Image: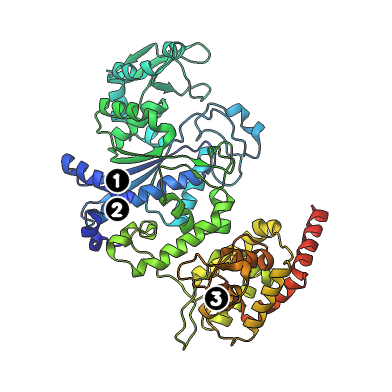
């Protein structure tokens, strides 16, 4: 674990939201006198884990690290990732391979439902729990996994379940006013597991014996049945279960989605009834798919964890979790490039910041106070600025080089920085792979090259001539300035309102670079032209410009689109 004590003073006043939440926990433990803080996240394994599930763990970990910085690491912390895997399977998810196989097992606890996915996992719930743990382990989270099935069966919850039997009426007094008349008539916080069918039963209790610690009810066949509330024979309805778990585990902090917000008071009251102190809450907004619909495990809509990691790093995903948790976020493929480049920008800025600004930088929270150094390309033996290689720049290199393998792009990168390699720049090497895959699947089919008009042809010809006269080792800044100089002579691109513009030296409007992106790259936006040209190479850039003037780029892309239509 990283020593965060050096941030202790600056952490006291940091405005970053994890520190705001962590200060509430500091006040809480001062009041309670506890010498350990327990963070918890909950997961419902009714479907495969999705990005929202990861978000809870990532954000909770951010608060945990902020707390450790505030307290100098003097107070131990734990994070439990809790799976509600004893819930009955109320419906079959849309994304399972064999729905008919699961039909007979509806309403059984998820850890009693057979596994439809294959492999060695003994149940549907065990498989989905493993999928959650696999990703959390890949990302490097420090956590303890807990299963509701195991906690109900191994005695972890026994003391509080017996207390729930003793205080049954107090729990009913909380729950009944929240229900309609029909539901009130049949409601019970206890859900027995039928010893005959194995299903979770939503039935009223005929009798609750607090002294014996048992409940009596009518089983599905009408037979009166008595079961102990301990040993995994019953579970609690989900709202009482929330509060019971907080009391049994002595949870200090839990965050949950906005869909739980109206029930938070119920969870708190039941936790208190069962002898616990309700934890600190943090309510976040929901994650949405590209249609603005809530991402759902059972529907399988929106991005999956594996899909994000096909095209971008876990750190870029964590960045989306850090930004404004109380604002709804659309998570779909189009957001990936921006998230990747923003992460790289924050990482690049971190070493130059003072502690106050470092604590507000997302990478502090993504990496638990110890972000890695940024990777930049620099030319050996020259006092030239090093280059930041962005996701968008790499994708444009993929486009102009027709690269389908990492080695092609590394050829351009090593031309600029001969000492760079996949071994010396592993983050950049991963980025190259992501860019190739993302370009092929999402960018290439949507590209829209166009022919330059007469004004653009003349301007591009002038730009090609200007670049051709520059040395091969010209800097990105020199190339960028050359592009500006060409545009200043073209009335269409002159901007006399720009800062510092004079009649003799006008500014340059964004229309010039928009034309470059449209005509040369088939995009609405693109990387800084100088950075692109210095890595692609001046000679290659000149050849690209002349191909665009001749209409070869449009023709090549039309051929690609025609072939795509033929192959479907």
* Real-space Cα separation, disc 3 to disc 1, in angstroms: 45 Å
User: Residue at horizontal 57%, vertical 64%?
Assistant: 510
The vertical placement of 471 against 288, above or below, is below
Q: Which residue is mark 3?
A: 480
The vertical placement of 360 against 404, above or below, is above
Cβ atoms under marks 2 and 1 closer than 8 Å: yes
Q: Sequence order check: which comes first, mark 2 or mark 3? A: 2
Which SS class for mark 2?
helix
User: Residue at horizontal 59%, vertical 64%?
Assistant: 526
In percent of width and height, residue 240 lies at 36, 26
* Real-space Cα separation, disc 2 to disc 1, in angstroms: 8 Å
Is residue 267 left or right of 465 when viewed as pictured? left
Which SS class for mark 3?
helix
Q: Quadrant of residue 2?
A: bottom left
Q: Which of the two discs, 3 and 1, sits closer to the camera?
A: 3
In percent of width and height, residue 162 lies at 30, 24
User: Residue at horizontal 17%, vertical 44%?
Assistant: 30
Q: Is residue 315 visible?
A: yes
Q: How is the image coloured?
A: rainbow
In percent of width and height, residue 375 lies at 46, 72
* Real-space Cα separation, disc 2 to disc 3, in angstroms: 41 Å
The vertical placement of 24 against 397, above or below, is above
Q: Which residue is mark 1?
A: 21
Dot 1 surroundings within 10 Å: few (below 14), some, or many (20 or more)?
A: many
The quadrant of the rendering that contains the N terminus is: bottom left
Dot 3 surroundings within 10 Å: few (below 14), some, or many (20 or more)?
A: some
- Number of numbered discs overlaid on the protein picture: 3
Q: Which residue is mark 2?
A: 66
Q: Sequence order check: which comes first, mark 2 or mark 1? A: 1
Which SS class for mark 1?
helix
């Amino acid at each position: 674990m990283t020593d965060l004590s050096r941030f202790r003073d600056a952490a006291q006043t940091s405005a970053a939201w994890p520190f705001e939440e962590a200060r509430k926990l500091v006040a809480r433990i001062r009041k309670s006198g506890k010498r350990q803080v327990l963070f918890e996240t909950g997961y419902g394994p009714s479907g495969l884990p999705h990005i929202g599930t990861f978000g809870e763990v990532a954000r909770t970990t951010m608060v945990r690290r902020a707390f450790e910085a505030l307290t100098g690491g003097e107070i131990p912390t734990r994070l439990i990732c809790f799976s509600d895997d004893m819930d009955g399977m109320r419906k079959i998810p849309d994304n399972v391979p064999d729905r008919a196989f699961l039909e007979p097992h509806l309403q059984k606890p998820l850890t009693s439902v057979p596994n439809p996915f294959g492999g060695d996992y003994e149940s549907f719930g065990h498989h989905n729990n493993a999928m959650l743990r696999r990703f959390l382990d890949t990302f490097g989270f420090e956590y303890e996994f807990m299963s509701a099935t195991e906690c109900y069966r191994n005695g972890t919850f026994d003391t509080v379940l017996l207390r729930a039997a003793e205080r049954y009426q107090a729990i009913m007094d909380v729950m009944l006013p929240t229900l309609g008349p029909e539901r009130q008539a049949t409601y019970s916080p206890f859900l027995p597991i039928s010893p005959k069918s194995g299903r979770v039963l939503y039935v009223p209790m005929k009798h609750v014996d607090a002294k014996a610690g048992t409940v009596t009810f009518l089983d599905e066949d009408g037979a009166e049945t008595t079961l102990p509330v301990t040993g995994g024979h019953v579970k609690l309805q989900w709202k009482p279960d929330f509060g019971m778990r907080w009391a049994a585990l002595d949870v200090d902090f839990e965050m949950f989605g906005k869909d739980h917000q109206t029930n938070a008071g119920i969870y708190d009251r039941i936790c208190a009834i069962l002898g616990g102190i309700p934890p600190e809450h943090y309510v976040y907004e929901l994650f949405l798919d590209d249609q603005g619909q809530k991402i759902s495990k059972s529907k399988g809509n929106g991005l999956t964890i594996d899909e994000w990691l096909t095209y971008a790093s876990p750190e870029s995903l964590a960045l989306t979790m850090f930004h404004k948790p109380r604002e709804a976020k659309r998570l779909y493929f189009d957001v990936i490039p921006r998230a990747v480049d923003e992460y790289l920008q924050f990482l690049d800025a971190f070493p130059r910041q003072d502690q106050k600004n470092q604590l507000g930088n997302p990478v502090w929270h993504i990496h638990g106070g110890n972000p890695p150094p940024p990777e930049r390309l620099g030319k050996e033996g020259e006092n030239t600025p090093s280059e930041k290689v962005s996701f968008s720049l790499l994708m444009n290199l993929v486009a102009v080089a027709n690269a389908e393998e990492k080695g092609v792009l590394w050829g351009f990168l090593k031309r600029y920085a001969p000492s760079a390699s996949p071994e010396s720049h592993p983050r950049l090497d991963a980025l190259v792979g992501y860019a190739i895959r993302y370009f092929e699947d999402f960018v290439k089919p949507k590209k829209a090259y166009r022919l330059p008009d007469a004004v653009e042809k003349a301007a591009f010809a002038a730009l090609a001539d200007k670049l051709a006269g520059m040395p091969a080792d010209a800097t990105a800044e020199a190339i960028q300035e050359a592009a500006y100089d060409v545009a200043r002579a073209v009335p269409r691109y002159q901007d006399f309102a720009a800062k510092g513009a004079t009649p003799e030296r006008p500014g340059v409007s964004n229309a010039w670079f928009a034309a470059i992106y449209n005509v040369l790259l088939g995009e609405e936006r693109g990387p800084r032209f100088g950075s692109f040209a210095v890595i692609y190479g001046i000679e290659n850039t000149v050849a690209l410009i002349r191909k665009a003037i001749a209409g070869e780029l449009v023709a090549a892309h039309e051929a690609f689109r025609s072939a795509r239509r033929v192959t479907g």
